[in-house]
Image (spheres, rainbow, N blue to C red):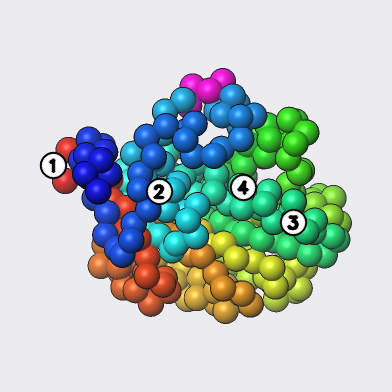
Amino acid sequence: DEENRRLREKYHIVVEGEDVPPPIEHFQDMKIPDALLKFLKSKRISMPTPIQLQGIPVAFSGRDMIGIAFTGSGKTLAFCLPLIMFACEEEAKLPLVKGEGPVGVILCPSRELASQTYENILQWTDALSREGKYPRLNTLLCIGGISMSEQSHVLNNGLHIVVATPGRLIDMLEKKRFTFNNCKYLCMDEADRMIDLGFEDDVRNIMSFFKRQRQTLLFSATMPRKIQDFAQQSLIKPVLVNVGRAGA
Ligand code: ADP
Ligand code: MG
């Protein structure tokens, strides 16, 4: 309605798609646990950025999504927070046991980006579990050059979240180190780079390992034709959230 339109205009957010969930201007109104809000505040994150205030409600709603916003605009939190909350919900309903999981996976085009995203997720899940009310979530960093035995403590419990580069993830799936039997959330970060680096077939291969209905999210700084085509083939009724620079 009018208020949603006003907010989107204020933050230069353009949306496309059917029944787009409304933007939410403050973290406090997003049903994010206080423990996490407090932690974010300690990191000087107190107001959501435009991609967060529109993207997080869309991701929370379970819709497929394409999130386009420039570098440095806070995309990581926009797709990690909904996954963390989803993993908490699933864990509260039915705790994962050894050999089960993950419930969600984040794909990155490089080891460096995967490592950074993993470190972020560890901070956020630690802040949550310190509060006591929330379950401990286990996250696995799945990239070349890291031996899985170093992370066996994660694989020896229920595994909630995997942050991965495509090649290594396929390797792990083919070796049945874990399965996607319970996996419902797939996010591709830096999708433009992912496609430029030729990971498109790998991502399709990874999609074929999913057994359940999947929520697919695609984040990128730019949206070239190739990404639009890929999204059309791989996403279902996606919501497009595009945060342009002024005038763009
Ligand atoms: P992107 O992936 O869009 O390039 P990042 O997710 O890497 O951006 O975030 C860039 C920086 O902005 C990070 O240091 C992050 O901690 C910070 N940041 C994220 N969200 C907010 C926010 N809501 N307020 C202030 N800083 C934020
Ligand atoms: Mg990023």
**At x 57% / y 62%, what residue is drawn?**
185
Residue 54 at least partly seen: yes
> What is the C-alpha distance between the residues marked 2 and 3?
25 Å
Say whether marks 4 and 1 touch (CB < 8 Å). no
Q: Which residue is mark 1?
A: 247
| Mark identifier at residue 55 | 2
| Mark identifier at residue 84 | 4
The picture places residue 115, in percent across and down from the top left corner, at: 60, 45
Q: Is residue 148 above or below residue 243?
A: below
Magenta stretch, main secondary structure, is loop
Q: Which range of residues does the magenta coloring cover?
A: 41-45
| Mark identifier at residue 82 | none
Q: Amino acid at mark 1?
A: Gly
Decide: few, some or many residues near mark 3? Use Cα within 10 Å; few <14, some 14-19, many ≥20.
few
User: Mark 4 vs mark 1: which is more N-terminal?
Assistant: 4
> What is the C-alpha distance between the residues marked 1 and 2?
20 Å
Left or right for 69, reference 32: left
User: Mark 1 vs mark 2: which is more N-terminal?
Assistant: 2
Helix, strand or loop under label 4: helix
Q: Amino acid at mark 4?
A: Ile
The picture places residue 140, in percent across and down from the top left corner, at: 70, 52
Left or right for 151, reference 48: right
Helix, strand or loop under label 2: helix
Q: Nearer the viewer, mark 2 or mark 3?
A: 3
| Mark identifier at residue 93 | 3
